[in-house]
């Protein structure tokens, strides 16, 4: 049967059975490693801060390697070739970069009871304004990321024949998210932590089978690469090698993405839920195993070209949905029962990060907006209840992206998310080491980085789908404008706008800091102490988990 036309009952049945299994796990998770009560953000939002090495590995891995990764990276390789492999160096250099900052963030958060990165900024600079900016940035950048998990889930549903138009086409997605919302509400972070074991086990099996079985079936890797190169040459777009114009973009996109990833609130949630520094150290060494998996996954984009895969047309928009490339590949090359397992792996792979992201966004709302500005005397129970409600709002806000906005646009929004979250690097990451940057310098740098980043993204067109704005993440250097001055006029080499915006952010932060220090403007009160940044799980005077 042609993928996307008519229901694929075998695949759908296996998908539903596995989906129901993880749903049961999600509700059971409330009692797993549970404290007397989940009515505290330490318990509901951070799993009691006591996850060990294996749980953290699956939780952080399940959080960073999402359904979108498993669907969109190979889809990008399918459409553009070598540029799609930027995800590989970025996840390799990521862990050495964040190894030490992650340890310091865990220690100071454990010592002071911080639940979010904005909590840390509030304590470090005594500035509710700066903390509010960090919190809003985190929430706004996370929303389209959750929406992208839905794009991956919808691609799978579409491949199994659930490809209706209008609200009916989105009904299975809504049912899946109602279930997700209910067990996240009840179990908090424990639900995705437990489900991540199933999700990652399925993903590993599916990918390892695919990368050995499919090349053997299609004539070997040499034939697959040659066929892909010939196809790109014929289309006159994309290439199996980087070109002179996109090498700089590849480098800056990889580096910018690596710097951004652990600034996302959901990435830090997995770190803060860990039991101690040794757990984080072991994870930073072991997590690159996922990058190996990601490299194998990306190669499936070339396999799909050789197999002659055609993306399914989205009944709602009438355009081919490039996100269906890998689901269709599995559908046409494997028996229905194995394709069903693969689809369940991708579908469950959407729910784990979506749950963690919604919890992280809810923590930001509760701690840094609700408690700071709306109810300063909120009890731990009131905070937990507020976070539960906020997690529901965030999830259904993400569903609204899919229902009311062209899904292609939500993919463009993810680029905006990366550019936005990168602007929190000076206030969050650099502040872990020094308070030299002034809080007004950080605010000014944030504002300039945000504004310029968005302006650059706004001015990038996408001729392929006719969009004049927010068309991608590749900006020719010739288009770089500094108050009308074009320092690289006529240069076709492309660069990642987020990287340019971050450089501007840092320059402005330093200049304003120098001025503020000359004028002796007060730089806020630092609530943290030097010893806080080295605290570990067995320290005698460590703050009890769940203390108000």
Image (tube, rainbow, N blue to C red):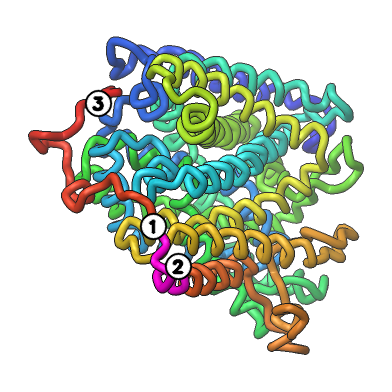
Residue 158 at x, y percent in the picture: 76, 34
- Mark 3–mark 2 distance (CA, rounded to whole Å): 38 Å
Do the residues bearing badges 2 and 1 touch, measured as CB atoms within 8 Å?
Answer: yes
The N terminus lies in quadrant: top right
The foreground one among 150 and 134 is 134
The relative height of residue 449 versus residue 36 in the rendered view (above or below) is: below
Secondary structure under the numbered disc 2 in the rendered image: helix
On the image, numbered disc 2 is attached to which residue? 516
Image position of 368 (left or right of 140): left
Location of residue 126 in the rendering, given as x and y in whole percent from the top left corner: 39, 46
Residue 517: quadrant of the picture:
bottom left
Distance, label 2 to label 1, CA atoms, is 9 Å
In this picture, is 467 found above or below 140? below
Asked which secondary structure carries label 3, the reply is: loop
Depth check, front residue: 23 or 345? 23
Q: Main secondary structure of the magenta part?
A: helix
- Give the residue at x 40% y 40%: 119
Q: Is residue 96 above or below residue 46?
A: below
Indicate yes or no whether the magenta region holds residue 483.
no
- Res 439 → quadrant: bottom left
């Amino acid at each position: 049967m042609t993928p996307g036309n008519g229901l694929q009952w075998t695949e759908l049945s296996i998908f539903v059975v596995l989906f129901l299994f993880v749903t049961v796990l999600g509700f059971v998770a409330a009692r797993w490693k549970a404290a007397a009560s989940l009515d505290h953000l330490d318990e509901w939002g951070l799993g009691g801060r006591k996850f060990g090495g294996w749980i953290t590995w699956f939780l952080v891995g399940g959080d960073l390697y999402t359904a979108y990764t498993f669907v969109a990276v190979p889809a990008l390789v399918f459409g553009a070739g070598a540029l799609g492999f930027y995800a590989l160096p970025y996840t390799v250099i990521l862990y050495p970069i964040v190894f030490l900052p992650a340890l310091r963030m865990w220690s100071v958060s454990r010592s002071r009871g911080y639940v979010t990165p904005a909590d840390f900024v509030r304590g470090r600079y005594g500035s509710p304004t700066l903390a509010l900016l960090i919190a809003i940035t985190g929430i706004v950048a996370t929303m389209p990321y959750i929406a992208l998990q839905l794009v991956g889930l919808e691609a799978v549903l579409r491949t199994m024949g659930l490809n209706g138009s209008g609200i009916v086409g989105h009904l299975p997605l809504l049912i899946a998210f109602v279930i997700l919302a209910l067990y996240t509400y009840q179990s908090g972070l424990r639900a995705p932590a437990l489900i991540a074991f199933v999700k990652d086990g399925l993903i590993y099996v599916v990918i390892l089978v695919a990368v050995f079985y499919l090349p053997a079936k299609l004539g070997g890797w040499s034939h697959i690469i040659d066929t892909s190169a010939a196809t790109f040459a014929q289309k006159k777009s994309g290439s199996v090698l980087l070109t002179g114009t996109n090498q700089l973009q590849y480098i800056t996109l990889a580096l910018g993405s690596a710097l951004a990833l652990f600034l996302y609130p959901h990435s830090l949630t997995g770190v803060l839920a860990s039991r101690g520094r040794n757990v984080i150290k072991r994870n930073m060494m072991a997590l690159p195993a996922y990058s190996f998996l990601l490299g194998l996954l990306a190669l499936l984009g070339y396999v799909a070209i050789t197999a002659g895969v055609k993306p399914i047309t989205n009944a709602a928009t009438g355009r081919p949905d490039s996100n269906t490339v890998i689901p269709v590949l599995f559908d046409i090359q494997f028996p229905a029962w194995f394709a069903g397992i693969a689809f369940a792996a991708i579908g469950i792979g959407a729910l784990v990060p979506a749950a963690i992201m919604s919890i992280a966004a809810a923590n930001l709302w509760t701690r840094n907006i609700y408690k700071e500005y709306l109810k300063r005397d909120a009890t731990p129970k009131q905070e937990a209840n507020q976070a539960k409600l906020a997690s529901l709002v965030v999830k259904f806000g993400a569903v609204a992206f899919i229902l009311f906005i062209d899904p292609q646009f939500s993919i463009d929004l993810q680029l905006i998310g990366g550019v936005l979250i990168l602007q929190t690097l000076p206030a969050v990451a650099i502040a872990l080491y020094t308070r030299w940057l002034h809080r007004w310098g950080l605010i000014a740098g944030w504002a300039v980085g945000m504004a310029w980043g968005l302006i650059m993204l706004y001015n990038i067109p996408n001729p392929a789908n006719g969009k004049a704005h927010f068309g991608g993440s590749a900006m020719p250097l010739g288009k770089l404008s500094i108050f009308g001055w074009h320092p690289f006029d006529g240069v076709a080499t492309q660069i990642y706008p987020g990287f340019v915006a971050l450089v501007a952010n840092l320059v402005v932060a330093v200049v304003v800091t120098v001025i503020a220090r000359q004028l002796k403007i007060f730089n806020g009160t630092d609530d943290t102490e030097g010893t806080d940044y080295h605290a570990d799980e067995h320290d005698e005077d460590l703050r009890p988990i769940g203390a108000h």
